[in-house]
Amino acid sequence: MSPVYIFLLAVALAMDALAVAVGLSLKYKWVSFRQFFRLSFHFGLFQFLMPILGWTGGVRLERYIKDYDHWVAFFLLAFIGLKMIQESSSGREFVKSKDPTTGKWLVLLSLAVSMDALVVGLSLSLVSVSIWVPSVVIGVVAALFTLLGMYFGSLLKKRRTRYLETAGGLILIGIGIKILLDHKVF
């Protein structure tokens, strides 16, 4: 997988983290470096670990689905992309807590924004892509996008965050189509 596709994949996966960070920064007052660090570190860490978990599971399944793995990868990426696009238009609410960068809310938010990365890790194992470089890039990009989202969240209106998730969904669908084209199924 080329560095461009790895970066685009990381950007697409980071859109959830960016949208949540923007939403939280619009709802809460971000006043300390510790809050910025906690949220961006945890989002990045979970985004780094989840593809590795998905990839590990996918390697175990490879011999059973070897002949149609590219279709599985495409459908998984398309499903995640469509889910992101759908969620972007649903106007979901963010958690209500004194400080969502601590305790159980931090873990729940980190898991929520990284579940897509688990399925992407599975998809990457099905097309025999090494997971280490993509996982590091995904984690770093997610952490940086979280920081940017918190910082610039107050400058954006709440309704604009949905466009970020829509863009991420479209990128994932495009990568799925690219996998099919690489296998010459069209």
Image (cartoon, rainbow, N blue to C red):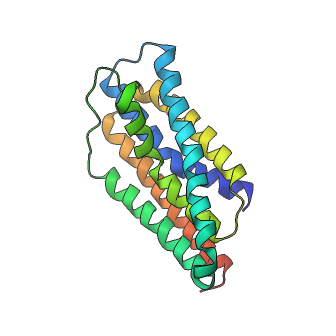
Query: How many marks overall?
Result: 0
The answer to whether 170 appears left or right of 82 in the picture is: right
In the image, residue 128 lies at what x, y percent?
70, 68
User: Is 84 situated above or below 111?
Assistant: below
Residue at left offset 72%, top offset 62%: 1
Residue at left offset 54%, top offset 44%: 47
Pick whichever, 59 or 174, lies toward us. Answer: 59
The answer to whether 185 appears left or right of 75 in the picture is: right
In the image, residue 88 lies at what x, y percent?
34, 51
Residue at left offset 51%, top offset 55%: 118
Pick whichever, 105 or 9, lies toward us. Answer: 105
In the image, residue 82 lies at what x, y percent?
40, 63
In the image, residue 45 lies at what x, y percent?
57, 38
Rendered image quadrant of residue 182:
bottom right
User: Is 105 situated above or below 113?
Assistant: above
The answer to whether 12 appears left or right of 181 in the picture is: left
Rendered image quadrant of residue 6:
bottom right
Instruction: State the quadrant of the C terminus.
Output: bottom right
User: Is 74 situated above or below 50?
Assistant: below
User: Is 121 situated above or below 21?
Assistant: below
Pick whichever, 6 or 170, lies toward us. Answer: 6
The answer to whether 120 appears left or right of 165 in the picture is: right
